[in-house]
Amino acid sequence: MTAVLEVTNLCKTYIVNKGQNNVLRNVNLTLHEGEFVSIMGPSGSGKSTLLYTVSGMDRLTAGEVIFDRISISGLSEKGMAELRMHKMGFIFQQMHMLGNLSVYDNIILSGYEALKRKGEKRSRIDVNRYADSLMRKLGIIETAGHDITEVSGGQLQRACICRALINSPKMLFADEPTGALNSKAAKEVLTELCRINREGTTIMMVTHDVKVAAQSDKVLYMVDGTIHGEYPLGKYDEGQGMKEREQFLTKWLMEMGW
């Protein structure tokens, strides 16, 4: 399997009141194409910082992060922005969208921005068609012309997934993507993430929810900025008992001190 993300001795330190806060300490991990990995751990353990640092949204302090064979520490701000736009997709707990645009326009915006890249072969028509296809797949095509205040939380988060996929990224980074949703909407969003993963997109997801994490391939458990354990679940088969996966994962998390 080809590695999409390789992290070696990653450290992230913030200076707070002239003191050092070592949020990440010598983190090592590898994600391969098509993997779905969840990051769990107590509050303050460094989960979100890890996601932001390996995706280049935050600069690393030491170590190395290689994404799709590119070392991100050597990239300029412009180069990093290009990499994020064309090869990464992002989904957050808070569904940040532009209030002056419709749901559809929010989705296609980054697709249009990507067309400015030299050598880009797509046209605006191609972006529009792909946006239509994504919205149909995720069951929200009827919301296309709506304002973002006129749709439900589940619909808006599925629109955020469409936006994250509009440039066909190699990998999705998701930070508590179901955290602000009710149980029905959370289940719908997770179903879509699993489907996207089965179609080949690699996913790294931060979550505190065992039911969410149980559908990933493996779970990494963080404590005090380091990875303390890894639990392999294997690919989720819809014919497999989810309750059993949740029970095994819960037992392991308890052993880890969760």
Image (tube, rainbow, N blue to C red):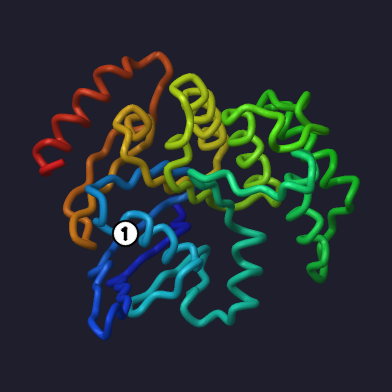
Residue appearing at x 41%, y 57% in the figure: 51
Question: On the image, numbered disc 1 is attached to which residue?
Answer: 29
Give the structural element (helix, strand or loop) at label 1: strand
Image coords of residue 185 (percent x, y): 52, 24
Q: Quadrant of residue 5?
A: bottom left
Query: Quadrant where the C terminus lies?
Result: top left
- State whether residue 141 is above or below residue 173: above
Tag 1: amino acid: Leu
Number of marks drawn: 1
Q: Is residue 16 left or right of residue 253?
A: right
* Position of residue 196 in the picture relative to residue 61 (left or right): right
**Residue in view at x 61 percent, y 66 percent:** 83
From this view, report whether residue 216 is shown above or below residue 29: above
184 sits to left or right of 217: right
Tell me: residue 155, above or below residue 39. Answer: above
Q: Residue 79 placed where, x, y %?
A: 62, 76
Q: How crowded is the residue under tag 1: few (<14 C-alpha within 10 Å), some, or many (20+)?
A: few
Provide residue 154's location: percent of width, then percent of height.
Answer: 57, 28
Location of residue 61 (image quadrant): bottom left
* Front residue (pair 130, 91): 91
The image shows residue 210 at horizontal and vertical percentages of: 29, 31
Residue drawn at x 75%, y 39% is 103
Answer with left or right where residue 119 lies relative to residue 213: right
Identified at 33% across, 79% down, the residue is: 62
Q: Quadrant of residue 38?
A: top left
